[in-house]
Structures are given as structure tokens and as C-alpha cells.
Image (spheres, helix red, strand yellow):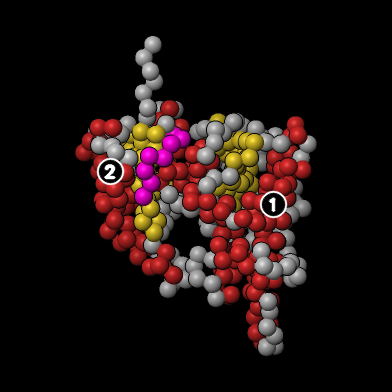
Amino acid sequence: MSEKKDVRILAYESSCDETSTAVIKNGREIESLIVATQIKSHQRFGGVVPEVASRHHIEVVSQITKEALNEANCDWKDIDAIAVTYGPGLVGALLIGVSAAKAASMATGIPLIGVDHIMGHIMAAQLRDEIEYPALALQVSGGHTEIVLLKDPVHFEIIGDTRDDAAGEAYDKIGRVLGVNYPAGKTIDAWAHEGKDTFNFPRAMMEDDDYDFSFSGLKSAFINTCHHADQIHEKLNKYDLAASFQAAVIDVLAHKTIRAIKQYKPKTFIMGGGVAANHGLRDRMSAEIAKLPKADQPKVILPDIKLCGDNAAMIGAAAYNLYNDNQFADLTLNADPSLELPYAKSMLN
């Protein structure tokens, strides 16, 4: 019997303010990962400027394609598929990655795979350990806060979603009030560990029967507290503010996710997205799962911190699963900024 051939995927990610390429072997091994960050370009604006992001992607995408292949000791002949994020994200930014991937596919004849950005974030866990299915994922980032049921490596369903501000978005918005540069999450997390939950901010929808989230009220309560203090010339402790905000976010995320774990009984629990790098959230979820009866404790896979942000390695991991399922795209593939994973037929089935 001949030995099974290794599958190498060259992946592109350009959905927001990171341009990234990677070569991934067999969906588990990172042979190269290049990330060209734009954070400094956007910090002076307090957030991502789409036109600026698109221009930066154009400037570097060809160079980092060469770098990814060189770092992996690969030539085009060694690549079995080309994968690219085609949504959700900023339409101009997505189009740069999609155009680069399509051009490479057309020039080389290598098959093309379109990958959902959120599926990629969740599959970052696959680069750390083997996922046993069914699995449950808490996806927390700047634009998305979702609880996702993974029936197998390619069939995902949203069972809970944010109705307004995502958790990461709320972090950035309150960061501006505290004078923290974008992105604010890492600093707020660090400050939270220095303070105490003294402000008792609201925990919206925590006791609702569904698995949906809302962080708009928390954000408003935080901002109003700070503005009121300014008006009466009262100085608030920034560490306690950060700790109080983070406690409110984590309480809701942990409570609803643990309830979903109890209902759906997954074999693996995953976190994905930029907020999955938050040490407070990682510690809390691990601790809450450890409190469950042994028989009900899923395997916990928390992605490497460096893979929580946008990167092409996660796209290559997800693309490997689609490759094995024969889900290929053609040259009509286009950016879909509003792309969504499917919702579960019944949120409470």
C-alpha cells in the first residue's frame, strides 16, 4: 500500500487589517506563517479605516506570498490547494486576498478553496490539538460573538449570536474612553488583573433562555459612568473600571457557554477569535468546565495566543477540511462581506 500523500495548502487572509499568508501541511502543521500587520497605521484613527487597509494589502500581498513559500521550503509544484478568506470582512480588503488567490490559481492550475473567516478562527484550535466531534465553540472577536455547534469538520451551526456590539467591539469602544490605543483588548485585560469589580456593571440577557448576547448596554453604562465622573470632577480608578467591565463580559460569556455545553454535551470545547486571547476569559472557561461532572467535561482546546488574531494559518487549517470534503471554488469566487455561518434550525433543539 502506498503511503498517503501530504497535503499542503497555501492560504491567504486579508479580511481586515492583517495581510497574511501561510503554508499548512495536513491541516495541522504550520510550515510557514507570515503576518503583515497594519495596527500602527490605524491607531491614529482609533480603529480600522477600510480604504487604508485595502491599500496596505495591495502593497504587501505579492511579497508575503513569496515569503510563505520560501519559509516553507516550497515551490508552487508542492502546493495542493490555494485557500482564501472570502468573507465576512471589509469588502475592499477581502477583494485583495480573493484576487491574489484567484490569480495564483489561474496561473498555476492549483485548485481554489474559499473559506469562511469565522470557520477559520474556530479551526485555529485544530493547529493545537485534534478536535473530537461534535464540538462547541465560543467565537469572540471584534465583529462577532457567537456560540457555534460543530457537527463535524465542515458543518457548523450558530446557536447563539450577538444582537448588537460584539465583545471585542465593546472593548475597543470603552478603550477610547480610557485613552487606550486601538486595539484595546490586551491592555484592558492587563488592567483588569490589577483592579476589582467595584462598579457592578449590567450583565445583559444572562438569564434569558436563548444563547444570544448583548454588550451595547454594558458599553453605554461604562461610558455614562465615566462621563458622569468627569462632570463632577471625580477621578475613577482605571484598573477597577477595567476589572468591572471585564467581569461583566466574562460572566455572561461563561454562563451562557457553560449552559450550552450542558445541553449539547460536546466532546470538545474550543474558543476562537481575538478575544480568545483574553487571559481572564481563558482562565474562567477552563475553571468553569473543570467544575462540571467528569463525564460531562469536554476536551478543552484553547488556540495559541498568536493564532487568536487574524492569520492565514487558521484559514489553511479550515481549508484542509474542505479539501477532504471536495468543497472547491472556481474563478467566479467573490468577496462576501456579509457571509454568515448557518443558524441552527432550532436554537433550542
Tell me where the magenta segment starts and ends, as one range. 27-34
- Quarter of the N terminus within the rendering: top left
* Disc nearer the start of the sequence (1/2): 2
Instruction: State the image coordinates of residue 154 (x, y, percent, origin top left).
Output: 50, 33
Instruction: State the image coordinates of residue 73 (x, y, percent, origin top left).
Output: 29, 38
Q: Which class describes the residues within 10 Å of circle 1: few (<14), some (14-19), or many (20+)?
A: some
Q: Is residue 274 magenta?
A: no
Q: Nearer the viewer, residue 146 or 307?
A: 307
**Which quadrant holds residue 324?**
top left
Rendered residue at 62%/55% (across/down) = 279
The residue where tag 2 is placed is: 70
18 to the left or right of 204: left
Rendered residue at 54%/36% (across/down) = 129
The residue where tag 1 is placed is: 284
Q: Nearer the viewer, residue 91 or 277?
A: 277
Q: Is residue 62 visible?
A: yes
Q: For the residue labelled by badge 1, is the local secondary structure a helix, a strand or a loop?
A: helix
